[in-house]
Image (cartoon, rainbow, N blue to C red):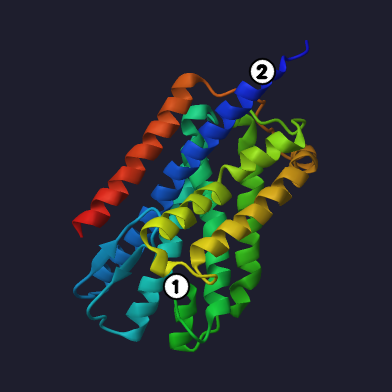
Amino acid sequence: MEIAPAASNKDALRSMLFIYGSFVLAYCLQTTVHELGHYLAGWSVGAQGGTISLHPFLNSRVTFTSVPSVSAQVTIGLMGIIADLVLATTFTLLAWRRKIGLTLPLLMWGAIAFIGEGIGMLGNIAALPHSFDDVGQLMLIDISPRPLIPLSIAFVVAGLILMSMLMPISGVSPTSSFLKKLSAFFCGLPLYFGVAVLYLKVLHPQEVDFRDVRLKQFLIGVVLAALLAVGYKPMDRLLRRVIRTKEVSQPKRREITYAVGGAILAFVSLMVVHSAE
């Protein structure tokens, strides 16, 4: 049966809204867990004067007035990544058993945790020796993090594969038009950080330059969205040989409401927490 263009366009818009809402909710969750990992690690090793700053668009961070040792500092640096990946993987595995629209934000947390932490690790290594963030702090105990580069790339690839496996839940099929697939993948990381750059440009213009991490994440997101749109169909064909993939289903209204409502709640919560600091 031929689908009317108007109905097809409506389904595409519903998918895009569903994906963006799920991504925002998952990203806010990832940011919070990552920074809490740093904070709780500092508390466990006896660091003093800890403060945590969370914001959906600005750089979130944890700072301490004093850290008891260099090894404690390294532990604090690593635990943000470890906490995010461990919890995201755990909840993704639990949610994977159902793979329905209501679980998409949790499943997407797993995908963006691997993509985000992988890209973050590569960025930490590339910034050496000018800064020592997260895995870069291994240098403080004379351990080079450069052997982690293959692992970082593996994380990104795993996240991209998982992201493609989630698309059928949002109504995007491997056989959908290239434009629909590109639009769907663009509604994740590129759109989020595109909005972040506009937010900074309007409200914090002094923080925007060509080296800004959010602009880099936007550009990386555009490249990844294009790669996923091109590779979605052949990747799905390959995955079907080793795993049972989800059948395509259009998101229901209540699922879209849940995703968008959760995204708004998570976004506003981080903004309120930031303004109260």
| Residue 274 horizontal/vertical position (percent) | 26, 56
Relative to residue 187, is residue 267 drawn left or right? Answer: left
At 57% from the left edge and 42% from the top edge, which residue is drawn? 187
Depth check: 163 or 141 in front? 163
The residue under label 2 is 6
Say what secondary structure mark 2 lies in. Answer: helix
Question: Considering only order in the chain, which callout, 2 or 1, is on the residue closer to the N terminus?
Answer: 2
Please name the residue shown 67% across and 26% down the image: 247
Residue 107 against residue 56 in the figure, above or below: above
Q: Nearer the viewer, residue 220 or 195?
A: 195
| Amino acid type, mark 2 | Ala
Up the image or down, 157 lies above or below 243; here it is below
Task: From the viewer's perspective, tell me whether residue 50 is left or right of residue 259.
Answer: left
Distance of mark 1 from mark 2, alpha carbons? Answer: 48 Å
Q: Is residue 111 visible?
A: no
Q: In the rendered view, tell whether residue 224 sits above or below residue 205.
A: above
**Residue drawn 53% across the image and 28% down it:** 100
Kind of residue indicated by mark 1: Asp
Q: Quadrant of the C terminus?
A: bottom left
Instruction: Say which element carries label 1.
Output: helix
Residue drawn at (47%, 27%) of the image: 256
Q: In the visual, does 164 lie left or right of 40? A: right
The image's mark for residue 227 is: none
Circle 1 or circle 2, nearest the eye: 2
- Res. 22 visible in picture: yes
Q: Is residue 47 left or right of residue 71?
A: left
Residue matched to label 1: 134
Could you tell me residue 9's position as x and y percent?
65, 24
Quadrant where the N terminus sits is: top right
